[in-house]
Amino acid sequence: MSFNHFDASGNAIMVDVSEKVPTLRTAIAGAVLSLKPETVQAIVSGRVAKGDVLGVARIAGIAGAKKTPELIPLSHPLALHHVSIEFEVDEQKGTIAVLATVRAFERTGVEMEAMAAATVAALTVYDMCKGSDKGIVISEVKLHYKEGGKSGVFKREA
Amino acid sequence: MSFNHFDASGNAIMVDVSEKVPTLRTAIAGAVLSLKPETVQAIVSGRVAKGDVLGVARIAGIAGAKKTPELIPLSHPLALHHVSIEFEVDEQKGTIAVLATVRAFERTGVEMEAMAAATVAALTVYDMCKGSDKGIVISEVKLHYKEGGKSGVFKREA
Amino acid sequence: MSFNHFDASGNAIMVDVSEKVPTLRTAIAGAVLSLKPETVQAIVSGRVAKGDVLGVARIAGIAGAKKTPELIPLSHPLALHHVSIEFEVDEQKGTIAVLATVRAFERTGVEMEAMAAATVAALTVYDMCKGSDKGIVISEVKLHYKEGGKSGVFKREA
Amino acid sequence: MSFNHFDASGNAIMVDVSEKVPTLRTAIAGAVLSLKPETVQAIVSGRVAKGDVLGVARIAGIAGAKKTPELIPLSHPLALHHVSIEFEVDEQKGTIAVLATVRAFERTGVEMEAMAAATVAALTVYDMCKGSDKGIVISEVKLHYKEGGKSGVFKREA
Amino acid sequence: MSFNHFDASGNAIMVDVSEKVPTLRTAIAGAVLSLKPETVQAIVSGRVAKGDVLGVARIAGIAGAKKTPELIPLSHPLALHHVSIEFEVDEQKGTIAVLATVRAFERTGVEMEAMAAATVAALTVYDMCKGSDKGIVISEVKLHYKEGGKSGVFKREA
Amino acid sequence: MSFNHFDASGNAIMVDVSEKVPTLRTAIAGAVLSLKPETVQAIVSGRVAKGDVLGVARIAGIAGAKKTPELIPLSHPLALHHVSIEFEVDEQKGTIAVLATVRAFERTGVEMEAMAAATVAALTVYDMCKGSDKGIVISEVKLHYKEGGKSGVFKREA
C-alpha cells in the first residue's frame, strides 16, 4: 500500500490535480458529542435566554470549513460553494450529533472540508460546556457521504 | 445550569479574564483513529521509504494548537510555551492514539489548544490515508489532564 | 503635526513599546447601521424562527477583534482578555447601534481592537440583510471610551 | 421578509451557489473619514517627508478585501481578480473619502469584499491619526455600485 | 520603466486580470542554504533517529505557498493545483538547495507562490539549525523556470 | 550534534520555554536584492509619481514579522513590541539591502521574526519588479545581530 500524498521518494507533496476536470463535489461528515444529559438539556432549554451554544458552534463549523487549507498541510485551497451544519440532539442519551455538508465545483473532493467543519463545530460546543462538564467526549468523527469525481458515490453503511 | 461564555442576557462573549493571575497551565488531550490494520502497518513500515504520515500529522497538530483562537470563536489568544504530539500505534487493532500536550503561563487554561492539536493531527492522518481506507473513524477526542489555575488538577479516570 | 507610526525619515514602523509598562486597558467603540425599518423588524421578530442575524454578527465581531493585528498593518499583536458586543435596536428609526468593549493588560491601547470588532459586526449585519435592503449605510464608527495607559481616560461627549 | 443566509429552520448557512453560472462581477463601496482639518493637511503635505498615511491604508484595504472570507462568517471564498482603493481628500472640510473597487469572475457578488476593503482602509487611516486626533469618525460606509449576476446593475443615487 | 502594480497615478493596485484567459501555469523557484558541513551531516545522518529537519521544512514550504496572498500585498488569491519541494544536499560544501514547484490553472502566474514556498522552506531549516549554527546564510533565492500565459517560457541560464 | 526542535525520540516539538524568564530581545536580520541598475533607478526616481515600491515592501515586511508563528512550524507565538524595516539602495550596483529590526520582551528570541520580515519585504520588492526584470536574485539572507536571553549578544562579523 502506498499513500498518494507522497512522491516516489517518500516526500510529502500537494498532489497535482491540474489535469483533472472540475466536477460538482459533495461531502457529508459527522461527529458526535457525549455530554451529561443535564448539559444537553441546558443547551436546548436555554437557547434563547441563556445563550445559543449550537448557533455559535454552527458559525465556527462554517468558518472551520473555510480554514481547511491552513489546517491540513497537503490539502488544496478550494472555492467552497456551500457549507451547512446540522445538529441532532438527544436529551435522554446526552448526545449531540453534528452533520456538516460541503459542496464545490472542483478538481478534488471536499471530504476534508466537511470533516473540518464537523470537528470544529464539535470542539466549539465542547469549549462552551467544559466549565460544567469536564467529561465530554467527541467520537464518531467520520465521512458519511461523498459524491462527484472519478471514484463516484461513497455512502457509509448505517 | 448556565454557560460562562454568555452574559446575563444570553449574549456570547469572550469572558473577561483580566483580573485573573497568570499561572503555569498544562493540558493533555487525545484522539484515537481506527483504521484498517493494513493501513496502520503501511504507515509504520513505510515511514522512511514511502512517506512519514505521522511526521506530517505532528506538524499539523502543533500548527493547529497555534490556530485555536481562530477556530474557537470565544477563546482567548494565548502565548503558548510548549506543544508536543505523541502517537501510540497498535498495528494489531488498527488504531493510532494521538496525545497532545500544551503548556503556557496564562490567565486561562490551554485545554482547547490541546484539543485542537489532537484533533487536527488526527484529521491530517485521515487526509493522507482516506484514498485507500474510506472507513476511518476518529473517536475518544477528550481531555486527559489539566493543571494550573483555580480549579486545580483534572485527571480523567482510565 | 507628525504621526508616531512613522520614523524621522517618514518610514512606517511598528512603534517600539518595549519600554512601556503594561497596564489594564479598556476601549469601547461603536458603529450604527441605518436600514429600512421593516428590515430591523424582521431581524428582531425573526430571531428564533428565521435566523439570529445579531447572534452571527456578534461572533463575527469578537473574531474581528482577534484579527486586528492582521488587518491594521502597524498594530501590535495583543493578548486580549475580554471582548463583548452589544446591539441597541431602534425599530422605529430603523437603526442598529453596535457597541464593542475590549480589555487587555498590555503596553499599548486596545482602541483598534474595539474599532475592528464594531466594524466587522456591522459589516456582518450588512452582509445578511443586503439581499433585501441594498441601501444600508454604516456610520458613526468611532471611539466612545478609552482607559489605561499614560494618556488617561478618554470619554466622547454625547 | 426572510434572510437568505438562513435555512428554513432559521439555521445560518453558507448559501449554495454551486448551480449559479460564473459571471464578471464588479462592486464599488465607500467610506468617509471626518478628521480635524489640520490632520488632513498634515497627511497631504507630509506624504513624502513625514510618512505616507494613505499609501499604508491602501495596502491595508487591498489585504482587507482578501481577508473577507475570514471576516464575514457566511461569505464564500472568492478568487479576486482586481482590487483598487482611491482616496478623495478635502482639506477644507477635513474629510477623506475612500472608494474601493473589486472585480471577480464568480458565482456570487463581490460587495462584501469592496465593503471590507473600504472599511479596513478607513480604519487604518484612523489608526495612524488617532494619536493626535481622538475625535475621528468614519461614516457613509455603503455600496455605491454593483454589476454582474442575475440582479443586474445597482447604482446608488447621489 | 514603470511598474504594473501601480496605476497611472502611482497608486498600488491588485492588477485587473479578469479579462485574461486561464491557462496552465508552472513555476519553479529555488533557494540555497549555506551551513557548517557538520550541520548538514547531522541533518542527513540523523533524519530517522534525531529528527527529520527537511521533512518539517517541506511541510512549511507547501503551507508557505498557500499563504502567498497573505504575504505579498498585491498578489492575487490563486487555487493552487500542485506544490512540491525538493532538497539537494551537498555535505562536503555544506549546502542545501531548495527547489519548489507550483502549478495552477489560472489567469496569472504562480512565480510568487514558488518563491514563497522555497523561501519559507529555507527559513524553516534555518530555524531548526540556528541553535548550533548561527552563521547560516540563505542565498540564490530566484526563479528557475516559468511556463504558461502570454509571456511564454522563462528558463534561467545555469 | 542534535537539534533542540526535536525530542529524544526525534519527534518535532515546540520547545518548552515556560521555565525561562522573559527578557528584552532584539534581533536584526537582512536580505539583499540584486536587480538591473535601471530597475533600481526606476524604484528610486519614481517613488512619488510612479509608485512607492519600497513603501509597499516595508508594510509587507512588518506584516510578515507578525505572521512568523504561522510560517515557521515550531516557532512560538510572540507578542512583538517593535518592527522596523530599512532599505539601503545602491543604484550603481543595482542592489537593495533590506534590514529588519524586531524587539519583544519574551522567553525566547525574535530571530525568526526578523528573518521573516526581511525575507517577505524582499519577496515583495521582487513581486513588483518581476514584470520587467526576471533575473532578480535575493541573497545574503542572514542574522546580523541578536541581543537578550542567556546566550547573550551575537554580532555577525562584517
Image: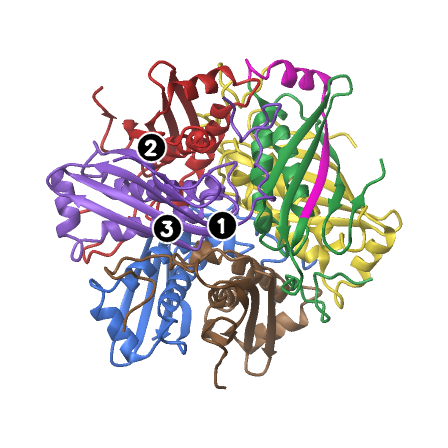
Chain colours: A green, B yellow, C red, D purple, E brown, F blue
Segment tinted magenta in the rendering: A25-50
Q: In 3D space, how far apart are the residues under numbered discs 1 and 3 (Cα atoms)? A: 22 Å
Q: Give the labeled residue for mark 3.
A: D62
Mark 3 lies on a secondary structure that is helix
Q: In 3D space, how far apart are the residues under numbered discs 3 and 2 (Cα atoms)? A: 33 Å
Indicate the chain on which mark 3 is placed.
Answer: D
State yes or no: residue D82 in magenta. no
Q: Give the labeled residue for mark 2.
A: C23
Within-10-Å neighbours for mark 2: few <14, some 14–19, many 20+? some
Q: Earlier in the sequence, mark 1 or mark 3?
A: 1
| A93 sits left or right of C115 in the view | right
Within-10-Å neighbours for mark 1: few <14, some 14–19, many 20+? some
Give the amino acid at mark 3.
Ile
Q: Give the labeled residue for mark 1.
A: D23
| Count of numbered badges drawn on the protein | 3
State yes or no: residue A44 in magenta. yes
Give the amino acid at mark 1.
Thr
Indicate the chain on which mark 2 is placed.
Answer: C
Give the amino acid at mark 2.
Thr
Report the mark closest to the observer, 3 or 2: 3
Mark 2 lies on a secondary structure that is strand
Q: Position of residue F101 (x, y in %)?
A: 34, 58
Q: In 3D space, how far apart are the residues under numbered discs 1 and 2 (Cα atoms)? A: 52 Å
Establish whether labels 3 and 2 are both on one chain: no
Give the quarter of the figure containing the N terminus of chain F. Answer: bottom right
Q: Position of residue C108 (x, y in %)?
A: 32, 38
Within-10-Å neighbours for mark 3: few <14, some 14–19, many 20+? many
| A59 sits left or right of E108 in the view | right
Give the quarter of the figure containing the C terminus of chain F. Answer: bottom left
Q: Foreground residue, C52 or F29?
A: C52
Report the mark closest to the observer, 1 or 2: 1
Residue at 49% of width from left, 21% of height from top?
D1
